[in-house]
Image (tube, grey):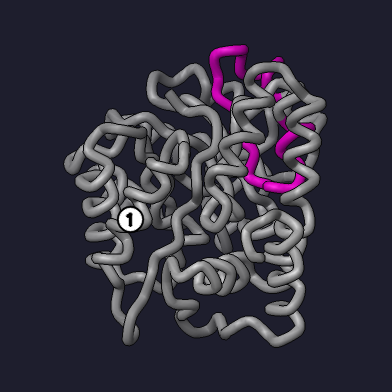
Amino acid sequence: MFKGSLPALVTPFKNGAVDFDTLKKLVEWHIAEGSSGLVPVGTTGESPTLTHEEHEAVVETVVQTAAGRVPVIAGAGSNNTAEAIRFMDFAKRVGADAGLVVTPYYNKPTQRGLIAHYTALNEVGLPIIIYNIPPRSVIDMVPETMGQLAKLDNIVGVKDATGDLMRVAKTRIACGTDFVQLSGEDGTTVGFNAMGGQGVISVTANVAPRQSAEVQAACLAGDYDRALELSDRLMPLHIAIFREPGVVGVKYAMSRLGLCEPDVRSPLTEATDETKAEIDAAMRHAGLLN
């Protein structure tokens, strides 16, 4: 179920509030453009600055709008186990297909603490994609720990944002071939898939969903020459978007296509003129702007 190009959806804002009309339009657009699934209220969805009520309303809106046409992996992470259980319970109740659960940040649990956290979440009964992103969470779930968790009924995969391509093989050995591995780094996704991955939870796919889906389709078909050709068109955009925090860059890029406003919530700020110029050039290289 979880493979291909899955956009880490932005949360559109208008006058400081969540713009649910635009959110619904984005869901429809992504499905029409060939995205394989949708991932609301992750980091790219600005989950750190959403209230609990906004978080849950975004998840419910995406699930209802997708209406079963593609799977929805709802952001459900927290460094507070009880809070993560709340998000998982809600996602299950409204019909999400899985929860994306980041390794707890800031309080830096041990590997034993990670096992306790995810074991508690496993009891909710909703499939879980572990989100391992050491640059943001400060901790790294090692493959041996992931292998222990993969034995639980509802721990089904990982979004791996370590940037370490050897990790794909190590995780496969630890967790088995049925464990889903999704790249969390747009720029390394072809290599990630070549090592045994099944797809990407993508920031760039917010602005280039069809192109991202084509890269993933080529990888899944084993046509890596085609995948590299397509990926090279997007590589400058991957780089430009992340000159500043990814959601800042991708919302600006989306605004250039009239998809949403570029608004982000403080403490994030609007992209600089230099970043905007680089994104514009990268969008032209990808064929997204004339």
Point out residue 188 in the picture as x, y percentages from the top left corner.
Answer: 76, 42
Point out residue 214 in the picture as x, y percentages from the top left corner.
Answer: 61, 34
User: In this rendering, does residue 76 appear at all?
Assistant: no
Displayed quadrant of residue 146 = top right
Side (left or right) of 63 relative to 100: left
Secondary structure, mark 1, is helix
Q: Quarter of the image for the N terminus: give it.
A: top left
Query: Residue lying furthest top in this view?
Result: 177
Residue span colored magenta: 171-192
Asked if residue 269 is among those painted magenta in the image, a careful observer would answer: no
On screen, residue 89 above or below 14: above
- Kindly identify the residue that appears in the image at 61 percent across and 43 percent down: 211
Displayed quadrant of residue 4 = top right
Pick the front one: 147 or 217: 217
Pick the front one: 53 or 138: 53
- Kindly identify the residue that appears in the image at 64 percent across and 70 percent down: 245
Point out residue 202 in the picture as x, y percentages from the top left corner.
Answer: 58, 47
Residue type highlighted by circle 1: Glu
